[in-house]
Each structure stands twice: as C-alpha cells, then as structure tokens.
Image (spheres, rainbow, N blue to C red):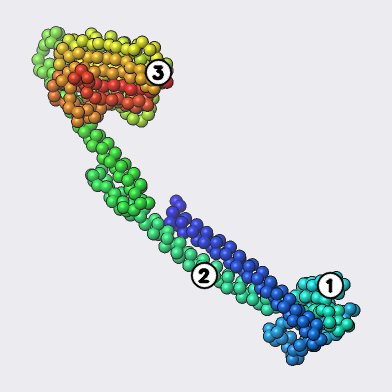
Amino acid sequence: MRSLRRALAVRFSLTMIVALALIALWVYVGTRWRLERELDAGLTAAMHLQSAALARGLPIAFQPESADLSAFIQRVNRFVTVRDSGGRVITANTPFAGSLPLETVSFRRARDERQTVLTSQAWANHQIRALYAPTPAGSDGSMAVIQVAGSLEPLADANRNILFFTVGTVILGAVATFFGAAWLADSTVAPVTEITDHAKQISGGTLDRRITAHADVREFQGLVRVLNEMLDRLEGALRTQRRMIADVGHDLRTPITAMTGQLEVALRSDRTPDEYRRILESCLEDARHMESIGEALLMLARLDAEQLRPELSDTDLEAVAREAVARVQARAETRPIAFHAPDTGRRTKADAGMVRVVLDHLLDNSIKHTPPGTHIFVSVNDNGDRASIAVEDDGPGIPGEDLPLLVERFYRRDAARTRDTGAGLGLTIAAAIAEAHGGRLDLSHSTHGGLKIELILPQS
C-alpha cells in the first residue's frame, strides 16, 4: 500500500532537486557566457590602447620577460604582436607573443578589408582567443595588423570553480530538501492521522461523540464536517434500527403470543369443529399480520438496496387513482371518499404498480386512523413540471411537529386518529417509492382540517 507521507516527500524532493539543477545550469551557462564576453571586451580594450599608442608613434609596451608562461597568463594574459603585411612579427609585448600562431583567414581580412576579427586558436597546449585589427593611420608603414590574444585557461578555471560550487549547491540543496520534505510531509499528514485516531475512538456505543481534531482549520473543516455529518446519519440509522428491531419484536410478539395462547387453550380439551374453526381463523389472521410485516420489511430492504427499481412507462395517474379509490370503497365503512381530477389528459412516466401500492397505503392510513364519518378527498393535480396525487381528510389532524415522524419506520401515535393498529410501515414504503421515482411525499395540514399527504412525481 502506498504511503502518502513518502509520496509527498519524494515528489517534493524531486521537484526541488530538478528546480535547483535547472537554476544551477542557468547560472553556470550565464556566468560562462558573461566571462567570455568580458574576455572579448578586455581584448578589444587592449587593442584600442595599442592602436592609440601606435597612432602617436609610441612603441608597444613591453612586459618584463618571464620564463614561466603559466605565471604570465595568470598575471597579465595579454599577448600583443604587430605584424607586417606578410604576417611576420615586427614587435611584441613579451617574448611569448612572438610564437603566437597566425590564423591566415582572419589576418587577411584585417589586413585587406580593414575589419576587426575575433577567433579562437590552439597554442602551446592552450586555447587562446585572438583579436586581429588593422594598424591605425599614423603608425609605421611596415606595420599592417595588430594581434591581441588572451589564454582561455583562466576562463576555464573560473568555469570549473563555478561548476564545482553550483554542483555543491545542488547537492546541499537536495540534502536540505530531503529533510525539509520529510518534515513537510509529516506536518501535512499529521492532521489526517489525528482525525483518523479520533474516528477510531468512535464505536457503536459512542456514536454521540464527534470528531473535533482540526475542526477550526480551514483546509480540514470540510473533511471534519463530512465525517461528522456521516456520524450523524449513522447515529440516526442506528437509533432507527434499534427502535425498528424493538418494534418488530413487539409487533411479532403480540400475534405470536395470541396464537400460542389460543392453540394452548384449544389443546387443553376437545372442542367442537366450529370452535376449532374460530381459533384457526384467528390464528390465520395473526399469521397474515406477521406476513404483512415481513413483506413490508422485505420491500423496504429492496428499495434501500436499489434492488427494486421503478419500471417507468406512460401512466395515466387519474385512472390509477380511480382504481385505488374503487378498491377501498368496500372497506371505507362510514368514510365518504370524494375524487377529483383535471380534464387535462396529461400522462407521466411512472411505475403504475408502485403508484398503486402508494395509493393503497395512503388510503389505508386515512381509513384506519380517522374516526367514523370522516370525509376523505382524493385529487389528481397537474402543475406543469410535476404531477401529484393528494389524499386528505377532515379528521382531527395531528400536531405539526409530528408530521415528519409519520414516514419513520414503525411510527404510530396513540391519539384520536388511531383506532386500529398496523405495522407502521405504510407511509415509510410510500415515501421510499416516491424517492425511487425522483419525487417526494409531502405531509401537511389539509384545508379541510385534517391531514394531507401528497405524492409528487416529476412530469415526463
């Protein structure tokens, strides 16, 4: 597994080393070019001085004789000769200059075309830079060309020194960069490590704790916020799961206890066929109640895992709503159901089967949890970019703070609206189906005084 700390250190070190190497190369090349320009400028200045002397009839300034060429190069490094038109040396500033090589092409150009020519030559195991220029007017008539030369050895020494220092700078910079990169990588990764340590301390029994490390640092606020929001969701999900397990246990225990009690009573003595039938019918009703709980939980699990997805098709919501109302009319008892739909004929893309399940749950909720005589109103609405089906009543209603709780799993209120019991999963399933369609389930107070639940779907 790759280490972020090591990757940061290596990448930063390589970047800095490459940058230092490029800077050193630039300094070396630039300095070498500058030294060469300065050597050429020095040769030109020496040529102008000698030309001025010759123009006044003065002799070439003679340097004291030295037996050591290398010492002369380090001390003076200027070789001056004056040549006649045939290239022979007439005079020189040092005996060493008498043996300077003659570059014939440059000599002729200076002699014939009266031009100043710079060139590089080899001489006595040295590389020299030579300047050829015509003699000035007023000088001796036998003089034709002035040759001024300088050895490149001092320049080479300077270049070697510069190269040594630049390479040393790169090496020292690389070492310093390595330690600096290691420190920078450690300081960069340290907050992540600390946040990870805080997260490790949070378990199922301490989900109420939150990550506080570096929560006040701008660069890590987003990470800490996302992790804490995830913990909020996990805590809520765990709370819901625990309550759901307890509610499922309670809901299953009640029919199981009833079935067990009735079967035990039936087995204590012989009974008539009618009594056995009545007991079996009661047990069958309890078994169907447990089956409905299991089916509801299975549907929710498949919806949560996205294993059950809507099969969208062109659906007439008005027809689906009319069918749902007709199905529940028989068991609506004393609750009149009014239906209203616009004459738009608009259709939408939806899973008709899932929409029927939602409407069955909404109508069943209104029938079970309202007192006799309550009116139920079903309406289909077309709002341009969305279509909706609303189920509302004129019952006693519920407090506003309880509205969001109605879609929670196994939520039931022991209030005036509740006169029958159920699994408490109907509205939860309805909300999950609405979300699977890209819509939502809205709960609000009805204008009729009771509860209004509206299934809102996007229009095709």
- Which residue bears the numbered disc 2? 172
**CA–CA distance in space, label 2 to label 1:** 52 Å
Label 1, residues with CA under 10 Å away: few <14, some 14-19, many ≥20? some
Q: Is residue 223 above or below residue 96?
A: above
- Circles 2 and 1, Cβ within 8 Å, touching? The answer is no
Between disc 3 and disc 2, whose residue precedes?
A: 2
Whole-percent x, y for residue 30 in the image: 63, 67
Q: Nearer the viewer, residue 48 or 305?
A: 48
Whole-percent x, y for residue 168 in the image: 56, 71
Q: Can residue 194 be seen in this view?
A: yes
Q: In which quarter of the image is the C terminus?
A: top left
Q: As shown in the figure, which amino acid type bears the numbered disc 2?
A: Leu
- Which residue bears the numbered disc 3? 348
**CA–CA distance in space, label 3 to label 1:** 97 Å
Helix, strand or loop at mark 3: strand
Mark in front: 2 vs 1: 1
